[in-house]
Amino acid sequence: MFKSKKLFIAMAFSTLLIGGCSKDSSEVKESNKVDDGTAIEEPVQEGAFVAPLTGEAVKEEITQRPIIVTVNNHPKARPQSGIEAADIIYEMLAEGNVTRLLAVYQSELPENVGPVRSARSYFVDLAKGYGAFYVAHGYSPEAKSMLTNNVVDNINGMDYDGTLFKRSKDRVAPHNSYITSENILNGAKKVGASMSYHEKVQEAFYEPDERGKIGNETSRVDIYYGNSEYFHNSYLYDKQSNRYGRQSAGVDTKDMLTGDTLSFSNVLFFEMKHRTIDNEGRQEIDLTSGGKAYVCQNGYMREVKWANIDGIPMAVEESGELVKLVPGKSWVNFVPTSPGLQAMVKTQP
């Protein structure tokens, strides 16, 4: 449907181009070993800079503003395009038991992203926390008011359908709206949005000589959003790569652009208050009050807490310090307090 390649864009403030670290397959990797003798691949530490959202070493300081895109997660929208390039992906309910994804891009930007879907107020809140440039196609009444009042710099497919946003002929609406990286940047120019990085959001990461193995050893974690198998997601730990593969309804989560199966260094679950606010089943999610959380990394899962840190829900220890993450990409699940983490998240040793 689209060209199956990624666009890696060099940083330059004056031209609003994207900075980052490409996944060059020829890059030399070093191998370390954890306590059980399992070989763990670690990227060679090149340069003195670290990507703020992944903790991975990069040759140049990342000065690119984060970009957040609402990505459709309806079964008819799968597989999605461009999600492999995201530093962090958030999954949360949009209406009923149907989830949407918020893909956070900073280290790299794919050639094409989508299908793009509509905004919710809590999507906008998260984008504001990141100081991100926000991309969506459509909105709830609450989100429309926030976007119209420029709570965040944004572009929306309701204003640019057929220009910045293109419809795929291979899928039916509303599962067929896509936007290229070039048009995201063009959109930023149109609305006068700076793409330089001011907020300096940064997670806490393990150092190369640290290997936190805390909690209960788990090979598989499942989450059930409602009763539909389409929203039964599984995270399967692979010792050799020290990453988690993801499946929905037993099907590997892949990127349509590359054909690659996604994998993550960290999988997190945050328990949050949800409230249904209209007859469409739209939700309101409390991103501020904090609560229980699970963190999965290195083949182990443990219970921690989450707190809103400068506008962003983040995993924290009992002490209030940030939970250290394994360098790499992360997937974050927002879970309703009713029925809650214990009922929705299941593990296998």
Image (cartoon, grey):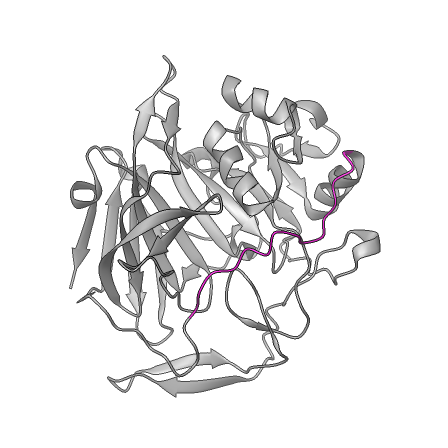
Instruction: Give how far across and how far down residue 70 sits, in percent.
Output: 53, 37
**Who's the residue at 26% across and 46% down the image?**
223
Instruction: Give how far across and how far down residue 275 sits, in percent.
Output: 32, 24
Q: Nearer the viewer, residue 119 or 254?
A: 119
Any part of residue 207 in sight: yes
In the picture, the quarter occupied by the N terminus is top right
On whether residue 242 falls in the magenta region, the answer is: no
In the picture, the quarter occupied by the C terminus is bottom left
Is residue 235 left or right of 164 when viewed as pictured? left
Is residue 319 left or right of 159 when viewed as pictured? left
**Who's the residue at 59% across and 69% down the image?**
23
Chief SS of the magenta region: loop
On whether residue 193 falls in the magenta region, the answer is: yes
Choose top left, top right, bottom left or bottom right for residue 325: bottom left
Instruction: Give how far across and how far down residue 330 sits, in percent.
Output: 43, 57
Compared with 224, 39 (above or below) is: below
Choose top left, top right, bottom left or bottom right for residue 334: top left
Is residue 233 left or right of 5 when viewed as pictured? left
**Who's the residue at 26% across and 73% down the image?**
213
Q: Nearer the viewer, residue 274 or 266?
A: 274
Is residue 7 left or right of 228 when viewed as pictured? right
Any part of residue 249 in sight: no
Identify the magenta region. Answer: 191-205
